[in-house]
Image: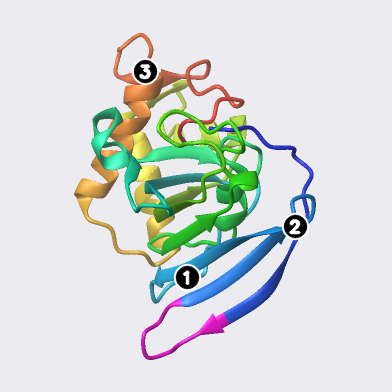
Amino acid sequence: MCKMSPRFTFYFCLIWSLQTLNPFIVLIRANESNQDVKIEVTFLPENCSQKAKRGDMLNAHYDGYLVKDGSQFYCSRSTNTGHPHWFVLGVGEVIKGLDLGLNGMCPGEKRKVTIPPSLAYGDKGKGPVPPNATVVFEVELLYISRGPRSIEAFNEIDIDNDKALTKEEIKEYLRMEAKKLNTQKDESYFDDVVADVFHKNDHNADGTLSLKEYNVYDHDEL
């Protein structure tokens, strides 16, 4: 996706909630474009104490649509073997409109984010997205992890202190994080996250992650 400047400011210009239908609509304006990102919260979990902020690593599924005709141009569940995406929020790893639109989101929350061209793919477009296209992303946030990764986090996960992370160690770490947040997750959820982590980072396929494979500056997982 398009890169962004790390410096941007924004403000909330409208918050509207309908308690009976439970959508929240928020408009966020990026100063340099003078255009709005529209956020609609379509599902908000009861426990929403952990909120995404700049620098956090997010794990999310999202579908992309063109506003003009409603056609779908992207679906994370049908690409990359259906794994959700890991990315760092607010540093330009996703389009600017998503960096703005996912701020403050909590695990389990679902949002519909409408993004103008200047905060999406611009006047050149990208792939199936034509130039000057307004796009909509339907996003389900699955998990938030602190980021970027650190040696302290590695040591916390590395229960047996052997300088290698096993699938079970990572799974146990995720279980503990979920317990801290009083969040109920099926075992299949942890299996999927761990599978995604090892799929992208176990480069020598030995079933563990070394310090090098856990590289603090990479961004695709933990």
The amino acid on which the numbered mark 3 sits, given as a three-letter code, is Asp
Which mark is in front, 2 or 1? 2
Whole-number angstrom distance, CA of label 3 to CA of label 2: 43 Å
Residue matched to label 1: 48
Any magenta on residue 18? yes
The residue labelled by disc 3 is: 202
Q: Nearer the viewer, residue 180 or 15?
A: 15
From the viewer's perspective, is 62 left or right of 163?
Answer: left
Q: Position of residue 95 (x, y in %)?
A: 57, 41
Whether residue 52 is situated above or below residue 127 in the rendered picture: below
Visible residue check, residue 168: no
The outermost residue toward the bottom is 20
Dot 2, how many residues are within 10 Å of its Cα: few (below 14), some (14-19), or many (20+)?
few
Q: Residues within 10 Å of mark 1 (few under 14, many from 20)?
A: some
Q: CA distance from mark 2 to mark 1?
A: 30 Å
Q: Residue at x 40, y 54 (%)?
A: 139
Mark 3 neighbour density, 10 Å: few (under 14) some (14–19) many (20 or more): some
- Tell me where the magenta segment starts and ends, as one range: 16-23
Residue in the foreground of this view, choosing between 45 and 42? 42
Looking at marks 2 and 1 on the same chain, the residue that comes earlier in the sequence is marked by 2
Q: Is residue 74 left or right of residue 49?
A: left
Tag 2 near tag 1, CB within 8 Å? no
Q: Residue at x 55, y 22 (%)?
A: 215
Camera-near label (3 vs 2) is 2
The kind of residue tagged 1 is Cys
Q: Position of residue 168 (x, y in %)?
A: 29, 35
Toward the top, the furthest residue is: 204
* Label 2: which secondary element: loop
| Helix, strand or loop for disc 1 | loop
- The residue carrying mark 2 is 34
Per the image, label 3 sits on a secondary structure element best described as loop
Residue 29 falls within the magenta-colored stretch: no
